[in-house]
Image (cartoon, rainbow, N blue to C red):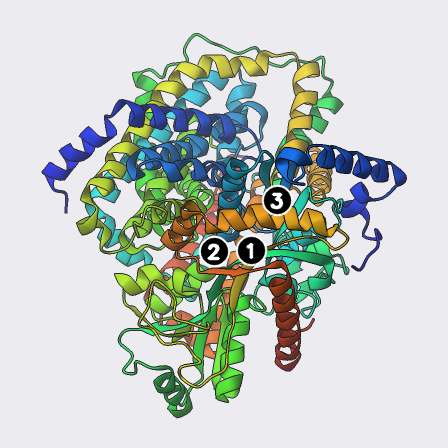
Amino acid sequence: MVASGSVWGAVGAVAEPVTLLLLVMGVLIGIFRGSLPGMTATMTVAVLVSFTFSMDPIPGMMLLLGIYGGALYAGSIPAILIRTPGTPSAAATVFDGFPLAEQGKAGQAISVATVASFVGGAISVLLLMFVAPQIAAFALNFASPEYFALAVFGLSIIASVSGDSLIKGLISGLLGMFLATVGLDPVMAAPRFTFGYEVLTSGIQFIAVMIGLFGIAEGLYRYQSGLADDGASQEISDILPGWAVLERILPVAVASSVVGTIVGAIPGAGGDIASFVTYNESKRWIKDNTFGEGDTRGVAAAESGNNSSTGGALIPTLTLGIPGDSVTAILIGALMVHGIRPGPGLFQEEPELVYSIFVGFFLVYIVILIVGLLGARFWARIVDFPSKYLWPVILVLSLVGAYALRGNPLDIWTAIGAGMLGYVMRVEDYPLAPMVLGLILGPIAEVNLRRSLQLSGGEVSIFTDSPLAMVILGLSLISLAYPIVQRVRERRTAEGRA
Amino acid sequence: MGGDGGDGESTTETSGSDDEATATDTDGTATSGSGDSGGLASEVEMICPWASGGGTDRTARQLASLAEEQSDSSFFVSNVTGGSGSAGFRRAANAEPDGSTVGVLTVEVCTISHLDISDISPDSFKAVMQYNFDPASLTVHEDEPYDTIEGFVEHVQDSDERVQISNSGIGAIWHLSAARFAQAAGISDQVNHIGYDGGAPATTAVVNGEVDATTASAAEVAPQVEDGPLKVLGVMGEEPVNIFPDTPTFQDAGYDIIVGAWRGLGVPADTPDDAVAALHETYQSVYESDAFQEFMSNNGFGLVYRSPDEFDQFMNQQYGEFENLISNLDLEA
């Protein structure tokens, strides 16, 4: 379906100076906003989309695509530097990115995240160009039973990201799922745990919880451990990844990109689910890993996973007119302003626009690669800033970010409450990852389970009749059992030695 | 207006005597500048109760940027979301009644108090203008053998199993539309209402065959109708929609149903009439501008205008209709 004539026409259209300028501006705006906790890609695109109404469709799309890629990439920067994911999709980047920063390798972690994001974005664009209709057809197979299976698969990851204690991991995961039940129940719209408060009917804001759990909790922890302690000073020398590092991370990044693209193509499943799945699969498949203690491959898996979801999300958007995530939903709106309706006819009616999106999005990731590698050494210095100035500023920014989400003061209290909870969890050594998984996936599992049963009149056959759902549920079982079996085996070996 | 400042944190700005003074100040500046800005406050905040990027937000931002071009005042949109719109409605209803805060009102103003989500009602506001109405549509897969609303009703009556109709969430407007239709056609006991997280997934559920029909708006199903596998049987408006001029209304088919999502503007109930008139004048000229008309039709948003009095009447009538419908549905918590 790729006609070379259209590709060259698209290269010409994207190469217009103004268009290129907008693309680069989009990336820079995206990186700036994405690196502030609480400012998501969706919000930034939504605010700037009205500026594109007066532009031609192609330059306008370049600005928005730049923001989209830039923001998803930049979520990794605060995740690595201050243990606070800038966007939900960067939550899995924290696990290895922050330990690397603590070892004085923040610069290296950022450049690995940059390369991995580039690989993820580039591969997802290639898949978008060559196999979009096939992937879109597959993604359309996802109805309620399959979404339920996918959410269960995601939840099964709890077993492997629980660290030393499975019990603590389960407590953390269940707490996350519980918090997500607050608000109107997703099937009958009955209020749950709202105690008559109107503001609670929309539930506890997930991003506010994350800002608290990570950023505020880390800030409180710093106060306890003493702000005079400035930790390891950052190595600035080997920031550009050498061949040794590239050789280490590239296989992980490429494999994660393919998986991330497919997850991203499923409507409603975005970068957050993609990065957890790729992080977990990489952890399972790489034998000699030190995931969780500062393994560059962990950063690479998470970042290529979440950035490849962007090209993935464009697949159903462009081929079916069904948005892959909330950002692509806005992109559809931006195109409709110009009278262009994404859908099956788009490739015939607007080939130049479609190929410009391919070429432009590829270029977005090249710009991210350049900006990221140049910026890594400066961003890494942020951690060298004296703690007594840095952390108060981060605490204030976290609260501002929580409020900026939707202008609701409740979210500030949510962030503070989650911060105290996160502090206790940190001190008592409870893993945070299961809680994030519970918060994201609990509601997806619940609503799709209940909707499936509503559709089938209570018959479980709606799951067993779907081969796809059964395969995914089978994979969940493996994913659940694997870490436990491994742990038992390790204990046996240890006992054998003793 | 319920609450009277008893709602704690979200209304702290309006309590205390300091704010009274501020109110007079703002009034003063607004009137002194009235020579060139026609009684408009110098800064107008538009509170959008729905998230940025959604349909309401996009139309509000378009209104704000065109209003800024057409007046000397600055207009900006803030999103205050949550509680099925109630957080934003409440913020707007409790703002200083001086014309400096405008609430973007949606059909939920007339539904959420009946659903026991909030005590917000049309009485919380003074109407400024309605600018949009998107009727519900009845949309099915093109493989279905029937092509009319009657055909659908017969199909439901003949079917052994309940027919599944998807909507954008239980209690949300497309669910209420489907319920209203089922009630009018006497098929309430033969349909299942299945809630999804918005109009897009509700439409996708018809595309991949998970449900039989959806009542999402014509604009929401349009991409799947023009190039995709869906067909629209009818729309629940007074007249056909622009994007599907040949699709009949439910009234044509003998059902007296007008249900849909609408958007308009309102100010706190105590706002003086001259401030309302100044706002209305600005927004009306925006509404009539080519730029706004083009924006709305390109996006598939239906253009319907109602003056302050007409909009007020319309909201009260809707409020009553939804009260009847919802009490019959047994949805209250």
Q: Quadrant of residue A188?
A: bottom right
Q: Which mark is residue A388?
A: none
Residue at point 71%, 67% (across, down): B116
Image quarter hosting the C terminus of chain B: bottom right
The residue labelled by disc 1 is A442
Q: Is residue A240 above or below residue B103?
A: above
The residue labelled by disc 3 is B46
Distance between mark 2 and mark 3 Cα atoms: 38 Å
Image quarter hosting the N terminus of chain B: bottom right
Question: Pointer 1 indicates a residue of which chain?
Answer: A
**Label 1 crowd bin: few (<14), some (14–19), many (20+), radius 10 Å:** many
Horizontal side of residue A48 vs B327, given as left or right: left
Distance between mark 2 and mark 1 Cα atoms: 7 Å
Q: Position of residue A471 (x, y in %)?
A: 35, 60
Q: Quadrant of residue B205?
A: bottom left
Q: Which mark is residue A151?
A: 2
Question: Pointer 2 indicates a residue of which chain?
Answer: A
Instruction: Please report contact status of discs 2 and 1: CB closer than 8 Å, yes or no.
Output: yes
